[in-house]
Amino acid sequence: MTTIDLGLPQLGGLDGVPTAEDTQTAKDFASDQEVRWCPGCGDYAVLAAVRQFLPTLGIKRENTVFVSGIGCSSRFPYYLNTYGMHSIHGRAPAIATGLAVTRPDLSVWVVTGDGDALSIGGNHLIHALRRNVNLKILLFNNRIYGLTKGQYSPTSEVGKVTKSTPLGSVDHPFNPVSLALGAEATFVGRALDSDRAGLTAVLGAAAAHRGTALVEIFQDCPIFNDGAFDVLRKGDEAAERLIHLTHGEPIRFGPAAEDGPGAYAVVQEGFGLRVAKTDEVDPSQVVVHDAGDHELAFALSRLSDQDLTHTVIGIFRDVARTTYDDATRAQVDHERKTRTPNLQGLLNGRDTWTVAG
Amino acid sequence: MTSSDTAVDQPTEQVIKKDRVVIRFAGDSGDGMQLTGDRFTSATAAFGNDLSTLPNFPAEIRAPAGTLPGVSSFQLHFANYDILTPGDRPDVLVAMNPAALKANVADLPAGGVLVVNTDEFTKRNLTKVGYAADPLQDDTLTEQYQVHPVAMATLTRGALAGTGLSKKDAERSKNMFALGLLSWMYHRPHEGTERFLREKFARRPDIAEANILAFRAGHAYGETTEAFAVTYEVAPARLDVGTYRQITGNTALSYGIIAAGQLSGLPVFLGSYPITPASDILHELSKHKAFGVTTFQAEDEISGVGSALGAAFGGALGVTTTSGPGVALKSETIGLAVTLELPLLIIDVQRGGPSTGLPTKTEQADLLQAMFGRNGEAPVPIIAPRSPADCFDAALEAVRIAVTYRTPVMLLSDGSLANGSEPWKVPSVDTLTSIDPGFATEPNAPDGTDEFWPYLRDSDTLARPWAVPGTKGLEHRIGGLEKADGRGSISYDPDNHDRMVRLRAAKIDGIRVPDVTVDDPSGDAELLVVGWGSTFGPIGAGARRVRALGREVATAHLRHLNPLPANLGDVLARYRTVVVPEMNLGQLSMLLRARYLVDAKSYTKVSGLPFKAEELQDLFLRLLDGVQP
Ligand code: SF4
C-alpha cells in the first residue's frame, strides 16, 4: 500500500479553535481556587502572566485545556478557569496527546516541571516532541524537587547538596533545550519567570505554532533552591549573561556598544559558537539568528551554561512540520470520505454461510 | 459406511461418515502451519461444520529451524453438532518434520492417522531432535498408528517443475500440498482457498499460482494414490438458524469496539503499544478508520492508556489493549481513571506470567491484578468473554458499563480466545441497542447557581456527569487528588475522603449485571462447576461427557467478575460441592470463598494450554464419587 498524500495546508497553532464572542480578561481566566504555592514562588509570576496572556489569544475559554502532571507547578490547572486535568507524575504529554488528536477544536497546554517532564516523564516528552502533536508544553525548571521537599532534579548542577545528596550530587544534568532539539522539536523557547514581556512573547509564538512547542521557564523556588536564577535578574550582571534571540537579527547582548546594542556578540567557531567582544570582530562574523536553522539552534543551546555564565533566551527554533494530529485526522477523514462505513458489511465479512430453518 | 462408484482408472475410495474430527497440523515455525490451519478452518466454516481452533506457536518469530522449540501447530476440531472446545487429542496428525512428529505424536491416540512429510527425515534433522534412528524406518509408529509417509517437498517440487521457480521457492508451497491432501481426505471445498491465495499473493502472481498448483497436487495425490483408501465425511452442523461467519477472539473484540463506537456515536480512540497476544486488535482497528476509529501506536504502555484517557476526557470512546505485563504498567493511570470517573476500556489479553512469562500461551492469572492491582481502593468492573465469538458481545457490554457508569472497565480475554476461532452467528446491527453517552450540557449546582459540580452523582447509577471541553459554562478541573463530594474541588477532609472511597465502591458494586444462569438439566445435581472466561468450552464439554454417563453435574459461567451477579451467593449455597477450574492457582475460588464463605474447591492448571474435556470429566467424576481433587 502506498501512503496517501494528505495535502495538508499550513495552519496556525490556533486554527480550528473557535474564537471568543466577547472580550475576555485575566479575571475571567482565574478560577475560584485559592492559590497555594509558597510565598515568593516563581509560579505566581508565571500564573499571572498566563492569566494575562490567555485572553489575548481570542479563543473561547471553554475550548482551552490545561493538563499537568505532578509537582508544585502541576497545580497550575486548578488556578485557571478553563477545562483542566491534574494527572499523574510525568504522563501529561501522553494524556494531552490523546486529547489533542481527537479534538482539533481545543487549545491544549501541558504544565510540567523538571522532575515531571525530564525524569519520570522523559519518554512521553521526547515522543510528543518527535511526533509534533499540537500541544504547548510549559516546562517550569526550578532545578529542584519542591513538592517532595528538596531533592536534586535532573537539571540540578553536579555537586548540588540536597537532602538526598548530602555529599553533593554526582548526576550530570540535562540541558532541556538541547534535549528538546535532539528530540526533533519544531518549537523550542526559553523564558524567565519574572520577565513578563519576554515570557509573554515566547508564549504567543508557541500558541501560534502548529505542533509541539516546548517553553522552558526558569522558575525560582525560594524554599529549596532560592535565588537559583538571580544572576539573570539584576541589572548589569544580567545583561552580561542574558543573550536574547530575535529571528533575523544579529545576536548581540550586554551593555550598549558604540554602534548600538550589545557590546558582546555571538560568533561562529568551528562547528559551535562563542561569545566575543563586538568591537573585536568583524560585523559580518556576528551570527544572525535564524529560528529555522536546526544546527544553529542546537549550537545556541550549548552556549547556555549550567552556571548561567551565558544564558540564551527567546525562541531557539520555530519550524513548520506536519503535525501528528493533523496527519492522523487527515487519514481518518480520507477514509471516511472514500469508504462508506457499513457496520453490517464489516461484521458479515466476505465468507458467510446461512443455516436455514 | 458407504462406497463411492468405482471408476476404472481410480482406486476404490471408501467414505466413512464421522460426527467429529480433530486435525492437528504441525511443522517448523517457517512451514506456514498457522496459514494452513487457517485455510482449512475457513473451508470448514464455509462447509457449515461447527468448529473450534487452537493455534499453538513459539514466541520466537523463527526459532532455529528443525528444533523442538521451533515447532508450530494448529489444531482444529470440527463436527456436525455444536462443539465447545478445540478437542483434547487429534485424530489426524500432520507432521512436516521430525521435530513436529516428536513434539506431537504422544498426543495422537492409538489408531490415529499420521501423515508425515518424509523429505525432512534426514539424519541431521533426526539427530537434532534426538531420534537415534528414523522412526519411519522401523515399526514403532506403524504398530500404533495408520502412518502415511508422503514425500511432500519432492512431490511439490515435481508439481511446480514447469513454473521456473527455484527448488527452494517451490518447496515453500509444501504446506499447501499438505492442505490439498487433507482437503481431499475430508471433502473440503476448494474455491475459497484458491481465491484466498490469489488475493494474498496478488502482487506475486507466480507465487499465487505455485501455491494453487501445490494445493491441487496434494488433492490429486490423495485421489490417485492407493495408499489413501479412505476419505471422511463430516456433515454440516445443525446450528441455530442465521447467518454465520468464522471469527477469532481478537477480531471479534475489534468489531465489538467499532460497533460500540457506532452505537454510542462516539469517535473511537485506541491508544496501544504492541504486545503479544493483543497486537492484532491494534492491527485490525487501524484498518477501520472509515468508522471514525483513530489508532495511536504509543511510545509505551503508559502512554497507550494515558492517551486513551485523554481522549475520553475529550468525549471519545477511549480504549487501550494489552496483555498482563502492560496492565502492570498501566495500573497508575487506571487508578487515575477510577478517581476521574471517566469511561475507559482496558482490554487485557492474558498470557502466561509472571513477567514476560509465556507470551504466546494462554493463562487466566490476571484476575486478581484486574481486581486489585492498583494503589488505594480503586475498584473497576471486570468482564470476561467465554469464547472467541463472545468477545464481540463482551466488548459491547464493557463499553456500555464504562459509558453508563463513567468508569474504566477491564475486559479479560486470553491467548486461546484471541487466536482461536469458531463460527459466529452474526447479529443484525439493527438489533443492537444504542449506548447513550449522555454528555452534560448545563450547570447542575443543586443550589440553583450557574455552577457546574463535576462530582454531583446520578442518584440511580451514582455516575458523575461527563462534561467535555468545549461546553460553555461547564469548565472544571479534575485530577488525581481527592475531590470534594459534589463540587469536585480538592479536599483533604477526612470524612469527605471516607465518603468518596465508599461512593466509588458503591458505584461499582451497584452496576446492574444479569443473574448467572445455571445449567443443571435435571435440577438434581449436587456438584456445581463454576467457570469464567475461556474455560467455558472445556467445562461444558466435560459436563456433557459426565451427563452422557448418566451422572448429574451443574455448571455456571461468570461473565461478570466485578461486580458478581446478585444471585451468585444463592446459587453457590444450593450445591453440596462447588468446584472452580481455572488456568491460575485459584484466583476466582479465592474471591468466591472470601465473598460468600463457601467451600469452593479449586482445580488449577497453568501449562499454557486450555483444559482438556477429558481431564475435567475425570475431575467431575472424582468429585461425584467423593474423591478430593
Ligand atoms: S516548594 Fe518551591 S516550587 Fe514548590 S511551591 Fe514552594 S517555592 Fe514554589
Image: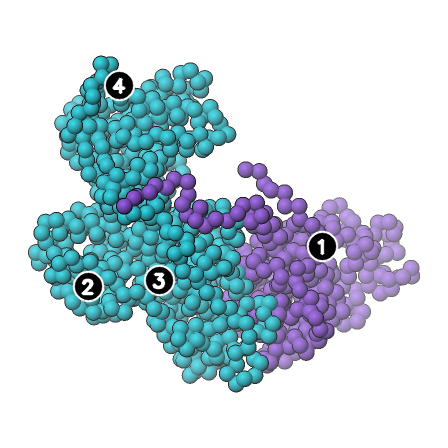
Chain colours: A purple, B cyan
Chain letter belonging to callout 2: B
SS class, disc 2: strand
> Label 4 neighbourhood size at 10 Å, few (<14), some (14-19), many (20+)?
some
Residue at the disc numbered 2: B600
SS class, disc 4: helix
Residue drawn at the location 36% of the way across and 69% of the way down? B511
Q: Mark 4 vs mark 3: which is more N-terminal? A: 4
Three-letter amino acid code of the residue under disc 2? Ala
C-alpha separation, residue under disc 4 versus residue under disc 1: 74 Å
C-alpha separation, residue under disc 2 versus residue under disc 4: 58 Å
Q: Are marks 1 and 2 in contact (CB under 8 Å)?
A: no
Residue at the disc numbered 1: A318
Chain letter belonging to callout 3: B
Three-letter amino acid code of the residue under disc 1? Asp
Residue at the disc numbered 4: B224
Looking at the image, residue B363 lies above or below residue A225: above
Are labels 3 and 1 assigned to the same chain? no
Are labels 4 and 1 assigned to the same chain? no
SS class, disc 3: strand
Between circles 1 and 2, the one closer to the viewer is 2
- Whether residue B461 sits left or right of residue B557 in the image: it is right
Mark identifier at residue B382:
3
Residue drawn at the location 60% of the way across and 54% of the way down? A325
Chain letter belonging to callout 4: B
**Residue B142 position in % (x across, y down):** 16, 26
**Residue B13 position in % (x across, y down):** 20, 23
> Label 3 neighbourhood size at 10 Å, few (<14), some (14-19), many (20+)?
many
- The quadrant of the image that shows the N terminus of chain A is top right
Q: Mark 2 vs mark 3: which is more N-terminal? A: 3
